Image (cartoon, rainbow, N blue to C red):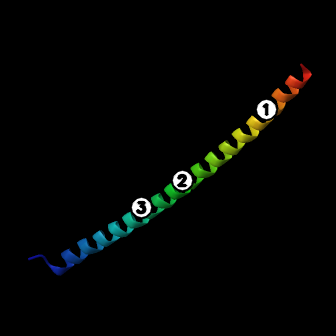
Amino acid sequence: MFPLSFVLRYFYIFLLISSLTHWFLGIMLLNFHIFLNFLKFLSLLIFNFILLWLEKILDIISIFLDLL
């Protein structure tokens, strides 16, 4: 049978490691969530830019066609 101090020491080490792991995974999940929100924002920005660019291209084409 193990002495109580031996068991308590490993219990404290286990408690420290598990709390650090929980904290680290929480930060990683938060960073991943921020990264996903950034990707959504970036895709919306690119989509809107493409729509504005297409509108401007169509205007330029119509101007050239009017000149002919």
Closer to the eye: label 2 or 1: 1
List the single residue furthest toward the bottom.
Answer: 4
Q: Which residue is mark 1?
A: 58
Quadrant location, the N terminus = bottom left
Q: Residue at 89% of width from left, 25% of height from top?
A: 66
List the single residue furthest toward the right.
Answer: 67
Expressed as whole percent of the image width and height from the top left, the position of residue 52 reads 75, 40
* 5 over 62 or under it: above or below: below
Q: Regarding mark 3 in the picture, which secondary structure is present there? A: helix
Residue type marked 1:
Leu
Q: What's the CA distance linking mark 2 and mark 1?
A: 33 Å
- For label 3, count other residues whose C-alpha is less than 10 Å away and answer few (under 14), some (14-19) or many (20+): few
- Residues at discs 1 and 3 in contact (Cβ within 8 Å): no
Q: Could you say which is closer to the camera, residue 57 or residue 15?
A: 57
Picture quadrant where residue 9 is located: bottom left
Q: Which residue is mark 2?
A: 36
Q: Which residue is mark 3?
A: 25
Expressed as whole percent of the image width and height from the top left, the position of residue 36 reads 54, 53
Q: Residue at 66% of width from left, 43% of height from top?
A: 47
* 40 over 50 or under it: above or below: below
Residue type marked 3:
Leu
Q: Residue at 87% of width from left, 28% of height from top?
A: 63
> Which mark is first along the chain, 2 or 3?
3
Q: Could you say which is closer to the camera, residue 29 or residue 40?
A: 40
Residue type marked 2:
Leu
Expressed as whole percent of the image width and height from the top left, the position of residue 32 reads 49, 55
